[in-house]
Image (cartoon, rainbow, N blue to C red):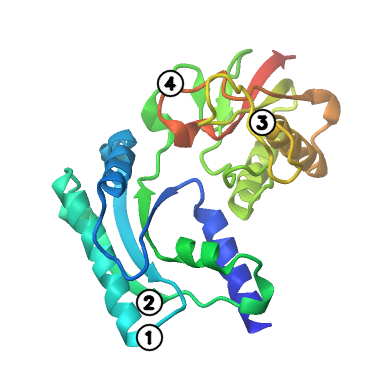
Amino acid sequence: MKRLVLFLLLLSSSLLKAQEEEVHSIYFGFDKFNLKENQKKSLVDFIKKIDTITIETIEIFGYCDDRGKDKYNFILSTKRANTVRDELLLNGIKNKIIITIEGKGRILIDDDLLDNIPEVRSKNRRVDVVVNYKPILIEELKIPGVYGSIPKNPIVGDRIYLDKLLFDRGSSELLFPARKELDRLAKQLHKFKNIEFEIQGHVCCTPSFQKEAIDRGTKKRELSVNRALAVYKYLGIKKIKKDRMTHKGFGNSRPLGKGPLLDRRVEIVITKVN
């Protein structure tokens, strides 16, 4: 039971951070801590795609599988973390933003609960590079017609981007920060009773030939649709009249052009001012 509670706490914490961090994992062979050329390339490719200006901090965590003694595994996992740190420094990452380099030792597994022990162990022999991004406020980006809240004199076409309307990757579930943000929006909408609007869902990071992403909850390619629908339903609960609202998913067809983190979003677009 304690393991379950701990797992749920860790999961909820990771969900809250999902939009503000990115994790890249490097996998090692048994009892190895040096990087092979393909591992170096994977790490370099990851670094190249990051806009380093947006990085606030980097954390590096090393792990081992469940075999061997604790002391040895802590040393090995630390060596793995340090090896990855050194490679990051060689490729232009500033040492001052790497705030954590930690060997976590063994990841224990329950043998009787898993079908493929060797595969699980291979995934546990790894280093996670956790990139924490600086918070970005939409007002700071100065995109014409895009606001962080309903403007004093709204007009048709105004777009409301909610900074804290966060979604986990592949999920349309509204997290706690998202609900709090929608509570704030609902109060505004009750004041601006004269506007009608469309709730527009968007996704990032899908291949160009796949305009929509898969919602892991339904296993269907409808993620942006479901995100918009989730917001629609929540605002309905907050007593926003449904005849004022429509909802639609746009997949990855309307990027903001400011990076993938901002494209995993839902916007409110004003369609009528009475």
Q: Tell me how far mark 4 sits from mark 3, CA to CA.
A: 22 Å
**First of labels 3, 2 by sequence position:** 2
What residue is at 22 percent from the left and 61 percent from the top?
83
Query: Which quadrant is the N terminus positioned in?
Result: bottom right
**First of labels 1, 2 by sequence position:** 1
Query: Which quadrant is the C terminus positioned in?
Result: top right
What residue is at 57 percent from the left and 69 percent from the top?
117
In contact (CB < 8 Å): disc 3 and disc 2 = no
Amino acid type at circle 2 is Gly
Compared to residue 266, the image places residue 165 above or below, namely: below
Tell me where residue 27 sits by quadrant. Answer: bottom left
Q: Is residue 12 left or right of residue 223?
A: left
Q: Tell me how far mark 1 sits from mark 2, CA to CA.
A: 7 Å
Using the rendered image of the protein, determine whether residue 152 is visible from the camera's viewpoint: no
Report x, y in % for residue 36.
Answer: 26, 52
What numbered label is drawn on residue 70? 1
In contact (CB < 8 Å): disc 4 and disc 1 = no
Query: Which element is circle 2 on?
Result: strand
